[in-house]
Amino acid sequence: MPEERLQKILAHAGVASRRKAEQLIVEGRVSVNGVTVTELGSKADLSVDKVKVDGQVLSAPKHHLYVALNKPKNCVTTVHDPEGRETVMSFFKGMRERIYPVGRLDYASEGLLLLTNDGDFANKLMAPASHISKTYLVKSKGTLTAEQEEEFRTGISMYGKRTAPAGLKLIKKGDNPWYEVRLVEGRQNQIRIMFKHFGHLVEKLKRVKIGFLELGALKSGAYRTLTNTEVARFRKLMNMEEPEK
């Protein structure tokens, strides 16, 4: 096998996404043949080099897994949490293959989350260029005006950069109405920040759809593996070649 960048090797081994893998390298938690590596440009060949993360030897996954989880509130979307909070990995204690979350849902949010050990799939799904939409149900403490709704759809300034056009539909009126929000970008806490921009806090936030994949009747804390048809459909959406058999 040719040498590859360490962050790509870690992602392929199901340790973490490439972005998170870069963080592990910089933190000095990765070694190659007994030598700690902190340079992001470093390369290795997993077929001949002994690569370790936190002292554990890596090996390429025997097969790829793609899992849909209904993430409950009050757990974090990471593999490990330095604050000791419950993570989404607590729902996979009996799983032999190492998987990790694709993207994130914040601590107080719930709903559909994908996990995998396919680094290329995860990287592509998170890439803005793939334009994979995500749909949410949002309960707001207060109603947006017609003008605010239009500004929400067009985009607001968030940390100096305008948000991409978004879908917004009022689905249940009331003092604390429910909205359906559809995004094609996933900036951290974006929906909560957008509603706060208009003077409203978000009371509840639940992701119900990623691309074509719906949360459906999956119970909170439960998960299921994606079917071969669903994986193939995602790969087609993202213009990924089918893996070799």
Image (cartoon, rainbow, N blue to C red):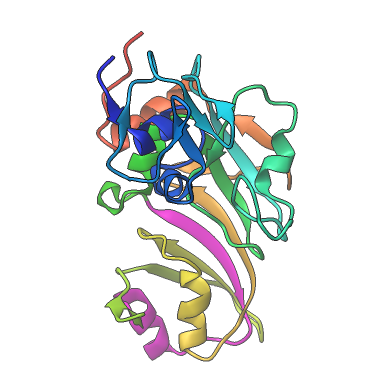
Stretch in magenta:
133-156
Residue 19 % position (x, y): 40, 49
Q: Nearer the viewer, residue 49 or 225?
A: 49
The residue drawn where x is 37% and y is 38% is: 7
- In the image, taking residue 91 as reference, residue 12 lies left or right, namely left
- In the image, taking residue 133 as reference, residue 100 lies left or right, namely right
For the image, the number of numbered tags is 0
Q: Does the image show residue 218?
A: no
The residue drawn where x is 50% and y is 14% is: 62
Q: Per the image, is 57 magenta?
A: no
Residue 130 % position (x, y): 28, 46
- Is residue 136 placed above or below 33 in the rendered structure? below
The residue drawn where x is 35% and y is 75% is: 153
Residue 154 % position (x, y): 30, 77
Q: Quadrant of the N terminus?
A: top left
Q: Per the image, is 153 magenta?
A: yes
